Image (cartoon, grey):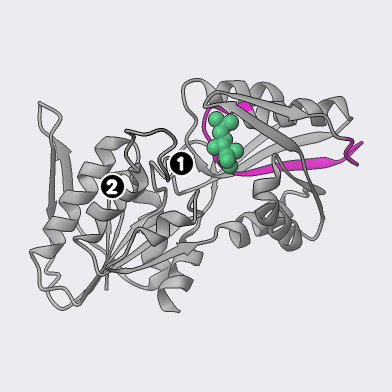
């Protein structure tokens, strides 16, 4: 069994290879002077079960993923599983206005042409999984690993910034062994959110605000401001997918004491690996 690491998912691929007791394939991945991508797999993959791991964001990593799939397909592999830890474009999962594409469907259709199985992590819209009509597609949950990690940090309360993610927050709180609550958020546009003030039992507590994605950071900043006003002792922001658009991280650091994310998008706040959960799902 081999794991082929895309350049966006090197760290997670190593962890996954360990969890699956698989070999990490030797590869060469580089860019030509015109920025086109070049990949080469320096292994004999004939007859092997192969996992490609590559986050499909930003766009250049999607192209690299397609090239890796094509390279693996040159071998007579036993099975190819494409693991896309963070599935970009998942937030355009329907036509909001006429004339728009269903971007998540467009990406899903391309990925599935070159794989036997597909796995992703904490997909933003579950409907994305349904776009994989020709292959088995699975969504892996990060909450068991995030919950275990936050427990070691002494977190005393979990807060969801909106009702939509309440289920996930509750699951994390169950693993931590603490209480959970949620705020009421209204998204006005891609960059503006409104939080309705709500009384929370946070005075003197270490509270972690948990979300699937942090993009502009506006959701977390608004939530943290409420927690501060209400006397929280310490605030952590924890997410699965650390997109951190523009100066989001800098803005988050002004209002949060700690920022944690998983390795679906590898960055300086990565503290949790989702590899054990991917391996578990792969064995099921
Ligand atoms: C929304 O439904 C998501 O769960 C996140 O809350 C959202 O993507 C965060 O975006 P931002 O960081 O731009 O507020």
Residues drawn in magenta: 199-218
Give x and y (percent) for residue 147.
67, 57
Tell me the number on the disc at residue 91: 1
Q: Residue furthest left?
A: 74
Q: Is residue 118 left or right of residue 197?
A: left
In the depicted structure, whether residue 126 falls above or below residue 242: below
Give x and y (percent) for residue 194.
69, 26
Q: Is residue 252 left or right of residue 282?
A: right
Residue at image location 75% in from the left, 58% down from the top? 176
- Which quarter of the figure has residue 69? bottom left
Q: Is residue 201 magenta?
A: yes
In the depicted structure, whether residue 180 falls above or below residue 208: below
Q: Is residue 18 left or right of residue 141?
A: left
Give x and y (percent) for residue 145.
59, 59
Give the crowd class for mark 2: few <14, some 14-19, many >=20 residues within 10 Å.
few
Give the crowd class for mark 1: few <14, some 14-19, many >=20 residues within 10 Å.
some
Residue at image location 45% in from the left, 49% down from the top? 264
Q: Secondary structure at mark 1?
A: loop
Q: Give the residue at mark 2.
A: 106
């Amino acid at each position: 069994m081999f794991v082929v690491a895309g350049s966006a998912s090197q760290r997670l691929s190593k962890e996954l290879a360990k969890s699956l007791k698989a070999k990490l394939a030797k590869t060469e991945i580089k860019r030509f002077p015109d920025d086109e991508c070049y990949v080469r797999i320096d292994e004999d993959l004939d007859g092997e079960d192969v996992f490609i791991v590559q986050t499909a964001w930003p766009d250049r990593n999607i192209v690299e993923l397609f090239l890796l799939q094509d390279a693996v397909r040159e071998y007579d592999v036993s099975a190819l599983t494409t693991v896309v830890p963070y599935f970009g474009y998942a937030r355009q999962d329907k036509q909001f206005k006429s004339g728009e594409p269903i971007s998540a469907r467009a990406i899903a259709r391309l990925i599935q042409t070159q794989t036997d199985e597909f796995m992703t992590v904490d997909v933003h819209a579950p409907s994305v999984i349904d776009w994989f009509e020709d292959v088995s597609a699975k969504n892996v949950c990060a909450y068991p690993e995030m919950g275990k990690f936050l427990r070691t940090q002494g977190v005393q309360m979990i807060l969801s910034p909106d009702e939509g993610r309440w289920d996930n927050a509750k699951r994390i709180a169950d693993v931590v062994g603490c209480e959970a609550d949620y705020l009421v958020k209204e998204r006005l546009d891609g960059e503006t959110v409104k939080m309705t003030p709500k009384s929370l039992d946070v005075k003197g507590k270490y509270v972690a605000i948990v979300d699937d994605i942090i993009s502009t950071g506006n959701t977390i900043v608004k939530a943290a401001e409420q927690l501060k006003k209400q006397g929280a002792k310490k605030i952590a922001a924890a997410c699965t997918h650390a997109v951190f658009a523009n100066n989001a991280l800098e803005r988050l650091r002004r209002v949060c004491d700690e920022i944690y994310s998983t390795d679906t998008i590898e960055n300086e706040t990565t503290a949790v690996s989702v590899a054990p959960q991917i391996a578990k799902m792969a064995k099921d």
